[in-house]
Amino acid sequence: MPQASELPTDFVLNNGLRIPALGLGTFQGDTVGAQVKEIVLAALAKGYRHIDTAAGYGTEKEIGDALKESSVAREEIFVTTKL
């Protein structure tokens, strides 16, 4: 098993951009209701720049609200989703 120091911190995409290897997962976020926005805001404040979601999670509005309210530039944040 690799040591933590050997794990990648990001991946290079085909367009040359680097996406953080670690992202905040929002699965079952709908069970905490309005807290999703606060959780995403806190994660962004702590340095997360990769948010993972899916339409089936039902958290898109809260994540969008957090991105709008955050002081982090949108160009710095990756949002990955699934259909």
Image (cartoon, rainbow, N blue to C red):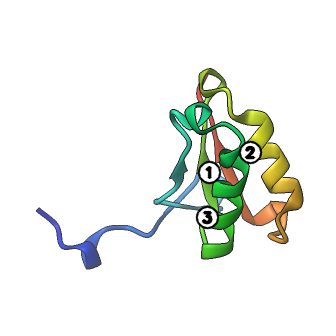
Element under disc 1: strand
Amino acid type, callout 1: Ile
Could you tell me which residue is drawn at 60 percent across and 37 percent down?
53
Q: Residue at x 67, y 54 (%)?
A: 78
The numbered dot on residue 51 is 1
- Please identify the residue farthest to the left as the structure is shown: 1
Residue at which label 2 appears = 63
Crowdedness near tag 3: few (<14), some (14–19) or many (≥20) residues, C-alpha within 10 Å = some
User: What x and y, as percent, mark residue 57?
Assistant: 60, 27
Which one is nearer the viewer's eye here, 11 or 60? 60
x and y percent of residue 20 in the render? 54, 62
SS state under label 3? helix
Using a 10 Å C-alpha cutoff, classify the residue at mark 1 as few (fewer than 14 neighbours), some (14 to 19) or many (20 or more). Answer: many
Residue type for callout 3: Ala
User: Of circles 1 and 2, which is in front?
Assistant: 2
Q: CA distance from mark 3 to mark 1?
A: 9 Å
Which residue type does callout 2 highlight? Answer: Ile
Please tell me which residue lies in front, 81 or 35: 35
- Quadrant position of residue 80: top right
Q: Earlier in the sequence, mark 1 or mark 2?
A: 1
Mark 3 vs mark 1: which is more N-terminal?
3
Q: Residue at x 61, y 64 (%)?
A: 43
